[in-house]
Image: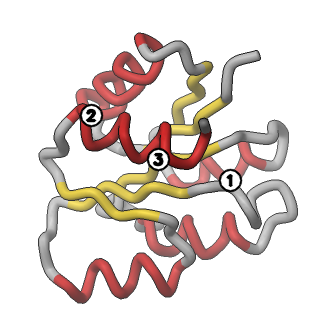
Amino acid sequence: MSHHILVVDDNNTNLNLVSKILKIEGYEVTTAASGLEALEKVNMVKYDLAVLDVMMPHMNGFELCRRMRQLPTCAAIPIIMLTASSDEEDRIMGEKAGATAMLGKPFDVDALNKQIHKYLE
């Protein structure tokens, strides 16, 4: 059985890129283009891991992560956040929101895969 990963990013190019990378690795992938769409999906399906973009309109990745952590289906899953900022404050905010790991953008494909394997294998 393959692991099911939720990928959330408002940028369609990034969403498709991450999704394609994960599918090549053999994961089942569901995408969401906003925090609200992601919250709807996590209420319907249990995911093994989530990859969230930080900078999104209406609900940023930190808020989405906080809300996901309050749900029984997401309280314990690994959440990897992707951020364009290398600011230490973003890393601290990610930790406070409940992120398992933070990766900088543009991200290295091998680094993303390594993080995912670390938490799922």
Residue to which mark 3 is pinned: 51
Image quadrant holding the N terminus, namely top right
Where residue 67 appears, as percent x and y from the top left, is 66, 71
Residue 29 sits above or below residue 11 on the image: above
* Viewer-nearest residue: 36 or 79: 79
Element carrying mark 1: helix
Horizontal arrangement in the rendering, residue 65 relative to residue 23 (left or right): right
Q: Tell me: residue 106, above or below residue 63.
A: above
Sequence order check: which comes first, mark 1 or mark 2? Answer: 2
Q: Could you say where residue 118 lies in the image, as x and y percent from the top left?
A: 49, 46
Q: In front of the other: label 1 or label 3?
A: 3
What's the residue type where badge 1 is placed?
Leu
Query: Residue at (51%, 66%) from the top-left corner?
Result: 100
Q: Secondary structure at mark 3?
A: strand
Up-down relation of residue 44 to residue 12 (above or below): below
Mark 3: few, some, or many residues within 10 Å (few <14, many ≥20)?
A: many
Q: Nearer the viewer, residue 113 or 44?
A: 113
Residue 119: percent from the left, percent from the top?
56, 48
Spatial distance from mark 1 to mark 2, Cα to Cα?
19 Å
* 28 relative to 52, above or below: above
As drawn, is 118 to the left or to the right of 76? Answer: left
Amino acid under label 3? Val
Q: Residue at x 60, y 75 (%)?
A: 66
> Can you give x and y, in whole percent of width and height, for residue 106 in the image?
13, 46
Q: Which mark is residue 14?
A: 2
Which circle's residue, 2 or 3, is located before the other in the chain? 2
Residue in the image at 76% along x and 66% along y: 75
Left or right: 44, with 37 as reference point? right
Q: Which residue is mark 1?
A: 39
Q: Nearer the viewer, mark 1 or mark 2?
A: 2
- Are discs 1 and 2 less than 8 Å apart at CB? no
User: Could you tell me how far apart the alpha carbons at marks 2 and 3 are, in whole angstroms?
Assistant: 11 Å
